[in-house]
Image (cartoon, grey):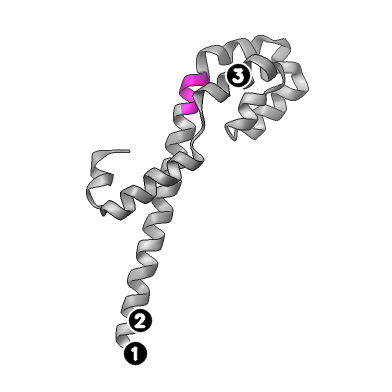
Amino acid sequence: MSILQKQGMTSEELQLLSSEMTKRQKSSGTTWLLWLFTGGVGGHRFYLGKTGTAVAMLFTLGGLGIWAFIDLFLINGMVKSTNEKIENEILSEIRLYKQAQKNSEVAAAKN
């Protein structure tokens, strides 16, 4: 996450982000193990949420092994990108929650 995104967050929100990331983030180790044992059928891609390409790998047996071999060089980037996407989703959820709180406070003040 960029420093600019962190600056506007309270310590409670940062703790929530950290806690949610711990729960939701994808593990490099797990991804590598899945590639090792199920790489030919796209198991690692299913784990990372890349369902479309995982199904394609499943039906082509990893492009007859070529695609699985290419993933050997792409796995670290895929894990990083998936975890960044997860972090951005959590940040969006926190912002939505924060906005909902403000809206309810404004509505309560009007009544």
Which residue: 71% across, 26% down? 56
* Viewer-closest of 16 and 44: 16
Q: Quadrant of the N terminus?
A: top left
> Of the numbered discs in the image, which one, if any, rests on residue 111?
1
Tag shown at residue 33: 3
* Image spot of residue 14 (x, y percent): 31, 48
Separation (CA) of disc 1 from disc 3: 57 Å
Whether tag 1 and tag 2 are in contact, CB under 8 A, the answer is yes
Q: Amino acid at mark 2?
A: Ala
Amino acid at pointer 3: Leu
The residue where tag 2 is placed is 107
Looking at the picture, does residue 6 appear above or below residue 37?
below
Q: Residues within 10 Å of mark 2 (few under 14, many from 20)?
A: few
- Earlier residue among tags 1 and 3: 3
**Which residue range is magenta in the image?**
75-79
Q: Vertical placement of 26 versus 58: above or below?
A: below
Three-letter code, disc 1: Asn
